[in-house]
Structure formats: structure tokens, C-alpha cells
Amino acid sequence: MLPLEEGVGWDGIDGVKAAMPVWRTRTVPRLAFYHHRPLGHRDGSRVARWRAQGRACWFMGYRPGYLFLRALHQARQNSAALAMILSYLGAGLRREPRYRDAEARRYLRERQGIRPALRRARSTEARA
């Protein structure tokens, strides 16, 4: 997965590349990983954390509709999540760079379609 990307979104890119068909991955049942601080805690305020997420989503090449729905879903718990939308749009208007691996971006966008999302939702319900 080298070289590692520097900047916002590097960990998301690593996750996408690990999930691509080139790699063989699997889940280890009952192995838990606990974060000891909230996601994006080092970014400062709650709004700054969500703005960083929006920029990362632009960099990774998220589908706009998927980002919008994700932000609305997160906003049910934390209204600051709506800042993700403005940050994503701002990154686009400023023509900030996107991750250079077009195949990884394509793979991510395929997974953000309606059918894959419904399939993941059904598999999550089955595990619950």
C-alpha cells in the first residue's frame, strides 16, 4: 500500500485499497478494537472534525449523494456533521486534488451505490 498518502484521508485510502479485489482480507470474529478518544478529536472543535471529514471525502472521491446522506445520518446525533457537506463542496470549488489512483476511487464509488449499500444493511441486520 506504499507510498502512504500524506494528509487528510490517508487512512480511508488505505482501507479502500485493502478492500479492493487485489487483496484478500477477512474479518476476525470477536476481535474488538476500541478507540480511546473520539474520531477526529485532535482536529479541535466538533465542526472542525466534520470539516476535515468532508475534505477527506473529497480527496477520496466520494459520490456526492452518498456524502450527503452520510452527513444527514450523522447529523441525527450531531448537527455539526452538516459541516461535512460544506467542506466537501468547498474542496470541489477550490479544485483541491483527488487521490491519484483512479482504480481505487472507482472501487470506492461502486461500493457507495444503492445496491451495495442495501446489501451491507441487510448483512448487518442479519448479524444483529
Image (cartoon, grey):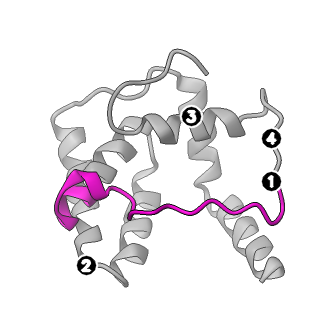
C-alpha separation, residue under disc 2 versus residue under disc 3? 28 Å
- The answer to whether mark 4 and mark 2 are in CB contact below 8 A is no
Mark 1 and mark 4 in contact? Answer it, CB < 8 Å: yes
Q: Which residue is mark 2?
A: 79
Nearest to the observer: residue 1 or residue 56? 1
Magenta region, residue range: 27-50
Q: Which residue is mark 3?
A: 14
Residue 29, compared with residue 78, is above or below; it is above
The residue that appears at 37% across and 36% down in the rendered structure is: 59
Horizontal and vertical percent position of residue 105: 53, 34
Q: What type is the residue that disc 4 sits on?
A: Thr
Q: For numbered disc 3, what is the local secondary structure? A: helix
Mark 3 surroundings: few (<14), some (14-19) or many (≥20) residues within 10 A: some
Q: In terms of sequence position, does the residue under pointer 4 or pointer 2 come before the other?
A: 4
Q: For mark 4, what is the residue?
A: 25
Quarter assignment of residue 41: bottom left
Q: Is residue 89 above or below residue 122?
A: above
What's the amino acid at mark 1? Thr
What distance separates the C-alpha of mark 1 from that of mark 4? 7 Å
Q: CA distance from mark 3 to mark 4?
A: 13 Å
Q: Looking at the rendered structure, which numbered label has been put on residue 27?
A: 1
Q: Residue at x 29, y 69 (%)?
A: 81
**Label 1 crowd bin: few (<14), some (14–19), many (20+), radius 10 Å:** few
Q: Is residue 30 magenta?
A: yes
Q: Which is more N-terminal, label 4 or label 3?
A: 3
| Element on which disc 2 rests | helix
